[in-house]
Amino acid sequence: MSNSNGKPLQISIDPESGFCFGVKNAVTKATAELADGKPLYSLGAMVHNPIEVNRLADMGLVVIDHDQFASLHDAKVIFRAHGEPPSSYSNIKDRNIKLIDATCPVVLRLQERIKEAHQAMTKCGGQVVIFGKKGHAEVVGLIGQTNGEAILVENEADLEKIDATRPVEFFSQTTKDIGQFMKMVKILEQRVPQFRWHDTICRQVANRGPHLKQFAAGHELMIFVGGHDSSNAKALFGMCQQVNTNSFFIENIDELRPEWFAGVRSVGISGATSTPSWLIENVKARIEEIGCRQR
Ligand code: SF4
């Protein structure tokens, strides 16, 4: 294939794009459960990607919220990779719920650590503090380990909520920015005499930034595939833009515009941790078609 200049069009998929292992594991479990044709309920959407959500819905996955879950009985339910608070596990046997727990092992371990820290802090009058996004499913599950007592900080201004005279154990939601977390650690180290912090940011996400920047800088045109509502996708796309102004964000192949590819010799394609590999492959195939038409 070549472009309008007669030069070959090189299209590369970022080898580190696509689902992180936690999401991959959860989607694999859901797909396997759906194979028997019986209804499967997911407590919240499995991924922040409407295309993948629709694919799973076509297979029979029904997304429900916590209110619907509370009144559900005689059903099979999957908990997604983000994890759930302890309250979601109560009374499920009484309601004859068969649970498929697809909580990511990294999130499960973090939940345990926060629970242990909360028990220790309760004994000494201390505080568990979590850096995270209010209302995010993972954060709801983490705060649930502390009976809702953990202090949530979303930014540096929120650090004022912490009583510096009492001990503090500081954690982070797995997908937060490590630079922001470390800035808060430095501030709290100065303010709080009895302070311990735990780097609980998942490297499946944190390590992607530097690699993605290198990948995006190495191509004339960068296509980033992600859900328009996914914060992970927006953050990663922002990194592409920092190093390559010729970067475009799409959710689906219909959004690809042929004029983007005129005169271009190399295209890089990447996606968020919630973007399925099959969608990225479809994007590549569509770009190949566009390139063929422009020859
Ligand atoms: S980002 Fe990390 S912690 Fe979160 S689901 Fe993926 S692998 Fe698990």
Image (tube, rainbow, N blue to C red):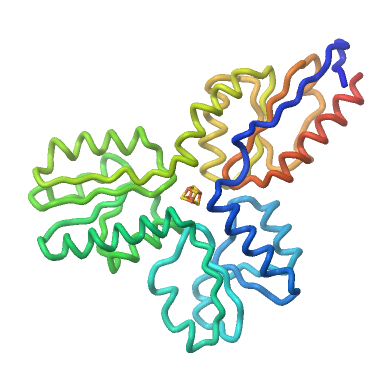
- At a point 53% along the width and 63% down the height, the residue shown is 102
Q: Is residue 34 above or below residue 189?
A: below
Q: Is residue 227 visible?
A: no
Image x and y of residue 216, in percent: 60, 23
How many labels were placed on the picture?
A: 0
Q: What's the residue at 49%, 57% (across, down)?
A: 104
For the view shown, which residue lies furthest in the bottom direction?
94
Horizontal arrangement in the rendering, residue 170 relative to residue 277 (left or right): left
Quarter containing the N terminus:
top right
- Residue at 28% in and 33% down: 183
Which of these two is toward me, 243 or 260? 243
Q: In which quadrant of the rendered view does residue 18 lie? A: top right
Q: Position of residue 139 (x, y in %)?
A: 39, 56
**Left of 99 or right of it: where is 263?**
right
Quarter of the rendering containing residue 227:
top right
Could you tell whether 240 is left or right of 126 in the image? right
Could you tell me if residue 198 is visible in this image?
yes
- Residue 207, given in percent of the width and then of the height, sits at 47, 34
Against 114, residue 172 (above or below) is above
Q: Nearer the viewer, residue 290 or 213?
A: 213
Q: Which quadrant of the view contains residue 105?
A: bottom left
The quadrant of the rendering that contains the C terminus is top right
| Residue 163, percent from left and from top | 13, 51
Q: Is residue 63 above or below residue 206?
A: below
Q: Is residue 102 above or below residue 131?
A: below
Residue at (56% x, 79% y) in the render: 98
